[in-house]
């Protein structure tokens, strides 16, 4: 009798694990995720090396804060403020950035985001003035979401290339016309979900 109870217990545990694993990994490879939905207030840091024609112009370190918003269906938006220090001159600056992105779940709690096609990183100064040029971010951001969806961590992974696009004479095309200035940037931020 004891042997039958042990076997039954083992079968119940295995069945429970299989059921749990099926639920836990069902979102892998999909944009839909009940975990990743809503707005996350974030803060973090990064650094960028700017260059023109292969020659380094300057290196900056940044402190970021803002919001990532996920719709739960594969689209989202970013709005943030960064404060930067130019390491060559010690000049301090501040700017606002925003972009639209798409994302996909790559595992039950891991995801990747990338700029929505035809959109760019829009930067403006603290007074709200936006220069006529903008940045194209080449590559993806990599993230992880906590099991209950309460927090996220997002990193650029290997340094990403940010291409400064010249003012587009035909903005309807949505293409980046490289200006010759590029930045290699690495960033990492942590966010907490904001109650709705």
Image (spheres, rainbow, N blue to C red):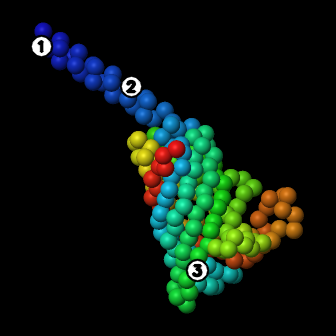
Q: Residue at x 56, y 87 (%)?
A: 91
Picture coordinates of residue 184, whole percent (x, y): 58, 72
Q: Residue at x 54, y 75 (%)?
A: 83
Mark 3 or 1: in front is 3
For the residues labelled 3 and 2, say whether their Cβ atoms are less than 8 Å apart.
Answer: no
Identify the disc placed on residue 93. Answer: 3
Would you place residue 138 above or below residue 107 in this image?
below
Picture coordinates of residue 71, whole percent (x, y): 60, 43
First-in-chain label (1 vs 2): 1
**Mark 2 closeness class: few <14, some 14–19, many ≥20 residues within 10 Å:** few
**On the rendered structure, is 27 left or right of 75?**
left
Q: Say what secondary structure mark 1 lies in.
A: helix
Identify the disc placed on residue 19. Answer: 2
For the residues labelled 1 and 2, say whether their Cβ atoms are less than 8 Å apart.
Answer: no
Identify the disc placed on residue 2. Answer: 1
Q: Say what secondary structure mark 2 lies in.
A: helix
**Mark 3 closeness class: few <14, some 14–19, many ≥20 residues within 10 Å:** some
**Mark 1 closeness class: few <14, some 14–19, many ≥20 residues within 10 Å:** few
Identify the disc placed on residue 103. Answer: none
Q: Say what secondary structure mark 3 lies in.
A: strand
**On the rendered structure, is 143 left or right of 119?**
left
Which of the two residues, 117 or 18, is positioned nearer the viewer here?
117
Which of the two residues, 55 or 179, is positioned nearer the viewer here?
179
Q: Residue at x 58, y 80 (%)?
A: 93
- Residue at far bottom of view: 89
Q: CA distance from mark 3 to mark 1?
A: 73 Å
Picture coordinates of residue 72, whole percent (x, y): 57, 40
**On the rendered structure, is 100 left or right of 187?**
right
Quadrant of residue 148 in the image? top left
Picture coordinates of residue 81, whole percent (x, y): 57, 67
């Amino acid at each position: 009798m004891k042997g039958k109870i042990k076997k039954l217990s083992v079968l119940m545990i295995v069945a429970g694990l299989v059921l749990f694993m099926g639920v836990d990994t069902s979102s892998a490879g999909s944009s839909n995720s009940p975990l990743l939905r809503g707005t996350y207030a974030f803060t973090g840091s990064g650094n960028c090396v700017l260059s023109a024609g292969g020659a380094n112009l300057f290196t900056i370190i940044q402190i970021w804060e803002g919001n990532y918003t996920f719709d739960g269906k594969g689209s989202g938006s970013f709005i943030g403020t960064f404060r930067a220090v130019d390491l060559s001159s010690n000049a301090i600056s501040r700017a606002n950035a925003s972009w639209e992105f798409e994302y996909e779940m790559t595992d039950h709690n891991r995801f990747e985001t990338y700029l929505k096609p035809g959109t760019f990183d829009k930067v403006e100064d603290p007074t709200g003035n936006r220069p006529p040029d903008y940045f194209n971010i080449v590559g993806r951001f990599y993230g992880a979401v906590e099991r209950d969806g309460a927090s996220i961590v997002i990193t650029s992974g290997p340094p990403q290339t940010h291409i400064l696009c010249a003012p587009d004479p035909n903005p309807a095309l949505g293409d980046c016309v490289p200006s010759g200035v590029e930045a290699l940037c690495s960033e990492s931020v942590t966010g907490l979900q904001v109650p709705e």
